[in-house]
Amino acid sequence: MNNNLNKVIILFLVCVLTSCSYKPIFVEKDYNFEIRKILVSGEKDINRIITNNLKLIKKTGNKSKKIYTIEINSLKEKEIVSKDSKGDPLKFEMNIIVEYKVINKNSLKINNKIKKNNIYNNESDKFKLEQNENIILKNLAGNISDIIISSIINLDDN
């Protein structure tokens, strides 16, 4: 019995020590652009997540890189999608709307609006409901920041 436990522990350690390392998609690449300034307005939690993701792009002293300023305006809406027979909410929908502009040398390069949404169930435990909403917010805002970065990459490719 003790021998089997030792094998399980060794197998677990080998799996943990040799597992692949996770790195965000946009971190390790060297891009032809640099985001010098990010101006935000609107929902502060969404802006914080997007700003942190945009700051992951490496900044180097390379003079040939294009320098961009990004203006972000975000909005979060929460709506009741369905109710039970008593009128209590059963499902909610969270909408995140982000308008962003990418500016290079006082020239507007991108002016875009992104809308992401998610429908989720109501919880009787309000703490758990709030935790679920925070997770959904982080995922949606993270997706939006990836779209912003991709649009800048595509702009740079053209």
Image (spheres, grey):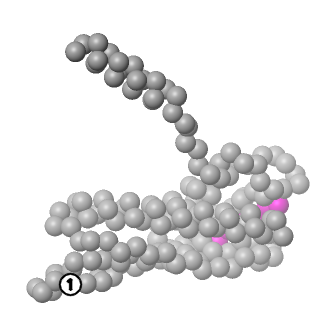
Q: Residue furthest top?
A: 3
Could you tell me if residue 54 is visible in this image? yes
Above or below: residue 77 compared with residue 139? below
Residue sitting at x 52%, y 28%: 18
Residue placed under numbered mark 1 in the picture: 83
Residue 48 rendering spot, x and y as whole percentages: 51, 60
Residues rendered magenta in the picture = 66-71
To which quarter of the image does residue 123 belong?
Answer: bottom left
Q: Amino acid at mark 1?
A: Lys
Quadrant for the N terminus in the image: top left
Residue 135 rendering spot, x and y as whole percentages: 38, 60
Residue 91 rendering spot, x and y as whole percentages: 27, 77
Assign a secondary structure to mark 1: strand
Q: Residues within 10 Å of mark 1 (few under 14, many from 20)?
A: few
Residue sitting at x 52%, y 61%: 142
Q: Is residue 77 left or right of residue 30?
A: left
Question: Mainly helix, strand or loop, the magenta region?
Answer: strand
